[in-house]
Image (cartoon, rainbow, N blue to C red):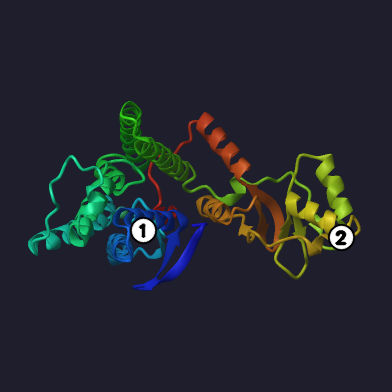
Amino acid sequence: MSWSWKIGRLAGIPIYVHWTFVILIAWLVAAGASAGGDLGAGLAQGAFALALFGCVVLHELGHALTARRFGVPTSDITLLPIGGVARLQRIPEKPVQELLVALAGPAVNVAIVAVLWLVGVRFPEAADDSNRILHSGFWPKILLVNVFLAGFNLLPAFPMDGGRVLRALLAMKLPYAKATRAAASVGQLMAIAFGLFGLSNGAPMLLFIALFVWIGAEAEAVQVAERAALKGVPVRDAMLTDFRSLRADDTLGHAAGLLLAGAQQDFPVEDHDDEPRVLTRASLMAGLAARGADAPVAEFAAASAPAVDADAPLVAAVTALRERGAPCAPVVRDGRVVGLLTLENVAELLMVREALGKTGDGSVSPAGGETVY
Ligand SMILES: [Zn+2]
């Protein structure tokens, strides 16, 4: 995830911190300092922030280690204010496995609450004090935070764990893509309810959460629908075949001529020994500004996206392209560039398949792509 800093590794999984999590902790420290007014209060807030951080890590490790039991590795864990994100390399194969993986995170928070409760930690009941979280002690605050982490994450809406629990339950009866669409719709209804409640009560935080839930639900449904529609489709079916390519010793001026002459923005550069690379419009402009029209394209062509085989599965190629933020990837067969894979072309293929009624059976291959918890 971008805008994140790596802080270490636990159980072999790299842990990152997102800048918004850092802001949350800064807010807690600032609020503690202004409420307490002395160094002791500031340090107490600092300790609380670290404990909060620990609870979120444990929540994510709950997901990651349960997934590992089902043979699904986790690429990394990123900490966000809303509970963190564990990037699993794929969706667990069976709905019951996804159910257990989704429940494992909130279960960790419930376990922490149970342990604190058993050792006698209680939250003071002072309903009229809106800042009571700042005025109560360390352990009651940890208790409350874990109640919040478990409760918020169990809301039945993507991208929260509860959305995945609901999807897994539905997927036991329905095709995966249908189950996802239904779970996403429940999430979006909840988002509307949150939004209306936030508007009528002047609570901007709820509006923010509503927006976050809405976008998350839609993204999940679209992504799964796409994976279902593209299941079994090879790269060659979606690649652009009517395109111009460049040789390594062509000049940037020649490339600029091709850019102006047609609609193509990115050009594969073929080099007999090396992997084919891509000269993007942005790198062409950078090259023209730095070296002028006579410089060879080879100097500015980047290996931003590795070449994909024409017979490789399209879903994996599209996922790789998105992850790298690359505009296109050269498609090769027997070492020769035979096409260009662009996201626009994939979108067009989806439109054509939908128009023809070829949307698949709604099932998604489990190896289809990574998922977040
Ligand atoms: Zn979770």
Residue 244: percent from the left, percent from the top?
Answer: 78, 48
- Which residue is depicted at the point 32% across and 35% down? 182
* Residue reaching furthest to the right: 294
Secondary structure beneath label 1: helix
Mark 1 neighbour density, 10 Å: few (under 14) some (14–19) many (20 or more): many
> Is there any visible trace of residue 107 in the rendered image?
no
Secondary structure beneath label 2: helix
Residue 363: percent from the left, percent from the top?
Answer: 38, 44
- Which residue is depicted at the point 49% across and 44% down? 230
Q: Nearer the viewer, residue 335 or 191?
A: 191
Q: Quadrant of the C terminus?
A: bottom left
Residue 7: percent from the left, percent from the top?
Answer: 43, 69
Regarding ligand 1, which quadrant of the image does it lie in? bottom left
Tag nearer the camera, 2 or 1: 1
* Residue reaching furthest to the front: 37
Amino acid at dot 1:
Val
- Which residue is depicted at the point 30% across and 44% down? 163
Cα–Cα span, label 2 and label 1: 50 Å
> Is there any visible trace of residue 211 in the rendered image?
yes
Task: Name the residue carrying label 1.
Answer: 29
Task: Name the residue carrying label 2.
Answer: 291
Residue 141: percent from the left, percent from the top?
Answer: 22, 56
Judge left or right: residue 325 versus residue 1: right
